[in-house]
Image: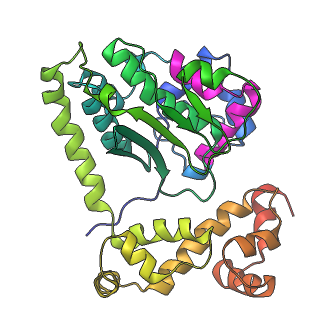
């Protein structure tokens, strides 16, 4: 089984076009995010999840608009969307469109959209597979608004969710309630868009079966290739990175997340020439490097966040990984001690 490429992905040109609609320039946003100034003009340029999050934080900062994510999604022309998103607008109905958008979003970024239907509602949540911090507020806003825009533009009716739950604190404004047209619960435990399941049955007048027949198999084939390329080690490390934020990862918990027994998971990891301890170390190294790239986080905090009992243990481990101290490593990258 081939190894999946690292988590880097290309930013959709639609985002750069969207910035102009809200009065921002790619160069200013990239400068604020401390990313390469030419990122928006090079087809082969890519970012990882942490860098993508920094990009959205920069958009929030420069716009000064708590609802900038909503504005971006609302103003963006459907025609500029990538095929993986555009195909959803030609679906049979809202349910079909939402399902296609959720399925093919994985082609653009290491992001999973989960849609759960039950008790007359459809709950939509988002998971960034390599994230080691909370999703930027504006990114969640833009994602949820894009799902609502799909329903409104696709059906030609004013789709109103049952409820929107947001982890972000209430900014005191009315932009979110005005846009979604429903109750918005701030400071919620999880981010969730809750739709009325009956709305998912609404047909899309622009349904184009020919286009779906043409694009569908191509997108499905590309998605299947990505999934086949994902080694069990890659999948384990994604789960370990998420678990590091809440405590020491447990092998049994990882096996349950992957839907297999501990014995099966152990065998598959061994078949790839690895062991659980190695994967945990690699996951820790990735998380540590990302945290050290943020000069606002103290080095002792980094040690705590990745599960070391004391800073001395962390320093010894880091020196064995990188051949230098955490502070020297940070200094060499950003000039911050």
Q: Position of residue 116 (x, y in %)?
A: 35, 46
**Which residue of the protein is positioned furthest toward the right in this rendering?**
337
Q: Quadrant of residue 209?
A: top left
Q: Can residue 235 be spotted in the picture?
A: yes
Residue at screen point 57% across, 33% down: 141
Q: In the figure, 49 relative to 76: above or below? A: below
Which corner quadrant of the image does residue 318 belong to? Answer: bottom right
Above or below — where is 40 with respect to 25?
below
Q: In which quarter of the view is residue 293 placed?
A: bottom right
- In the drawing, does residue 304 fall left or right of residue 236? right
Residue at 34% of width from left, 66% of height from top?
3
Taking the image as shown, residue 267 lies to the left or right of residue 317, namely left
Q: Nearer the viewer, residue 53 or 147?
A: 147
Q: Which residues are magenta?
A: 51-75
Asked if residue 66 is among those painted magenta in the image, a careful observer would answer yes
Q: Is residue 36 visible?
A: no
In percent of width and height, residue 254 lies at 43, 75
Choose between 244 and 188: the one closer to the eye: 188
Screen quadrant of the N terminus: bottom left
Quadrant the C terminus occupies? bottom right
Membership of 330 in magenta stretch? no
Does 266 sit above or below residue 125? below
Pinpoint residue 192: horizontal percent, then vertical percent.
51, 42
Query: Where's residue 61, x and y in %?
Result: 76, 33
Whether residue 232 sits left or right of residue 222 in the image: it is right
Task: Tell me: residue 188, above or below residue 310.
Answer: above
């Amino acid at each position: 089984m081939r190894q999946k490429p690292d988590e880097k992905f290309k930013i959709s040109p639609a985002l750069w076009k969207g910035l102009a609609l809200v009065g921002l320039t790619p160069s200013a946003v990239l400068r604020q995010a401390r990313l390469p100034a030419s990122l928006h003009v090079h087809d082969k340029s890519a970012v990882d999840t942490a860098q993508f999050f920094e990009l959205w934080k920069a958009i929030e900062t420069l716009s000064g608009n708590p609802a900038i994510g909503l504005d971006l999604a609302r103003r963006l022309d459907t025609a500029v969307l990538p095929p993986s998103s555009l195909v959803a607008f030609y679906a049979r109905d809202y349910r079909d469109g939402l399902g296609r958008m959720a399925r093919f979003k994985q082609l653009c970024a290491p992001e999973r959209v989960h849609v759960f239907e039950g008790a007359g509602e459809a709950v939509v949540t988002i998971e960034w597979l390599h994230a080691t911090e909370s999703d930027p507020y504006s990114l969640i806003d833009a994602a949820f608004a894009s799902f609502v825009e799909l329903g409104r533009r696709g059906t030609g009716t004013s789709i109103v969710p049952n409820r929107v739950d947001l982890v972000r604190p209430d900014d005191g404004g009315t932009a979110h309630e005005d846009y979604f047209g429903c109750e918005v619960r701030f400071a919620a435990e999880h981010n969730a868009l809750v739709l009325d399941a009956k709305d998912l049955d609404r047909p899309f007048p622009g349904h184009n079966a020919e286009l779906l027949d043409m694009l569908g198999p191509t997108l499905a084939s590309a998605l299947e290739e990505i999934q086949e390329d994902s080694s069990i080690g890659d999948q384990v490390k994604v789960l370990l990175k998420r678990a590091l934020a809440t405590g020491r990862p447990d092998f049994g918990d990882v096996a349950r997340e992957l839907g297999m027994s501990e014995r099966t998971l152990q065998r598959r990891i061994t078949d790839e020439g690895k062991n659980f301890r190695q994967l945990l170390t690699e996951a820790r190294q990735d998380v540590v490097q990302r945290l050290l790239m943020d000069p606002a986080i103290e080095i002792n905090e980094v040690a705590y966040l990745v599960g070391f009992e004391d800073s001395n243990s962390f320093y010894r481990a880091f020196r064995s990984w990188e051949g230098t101290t955490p502070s020297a490593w940070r200094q060499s990258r950003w000039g911050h001690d």
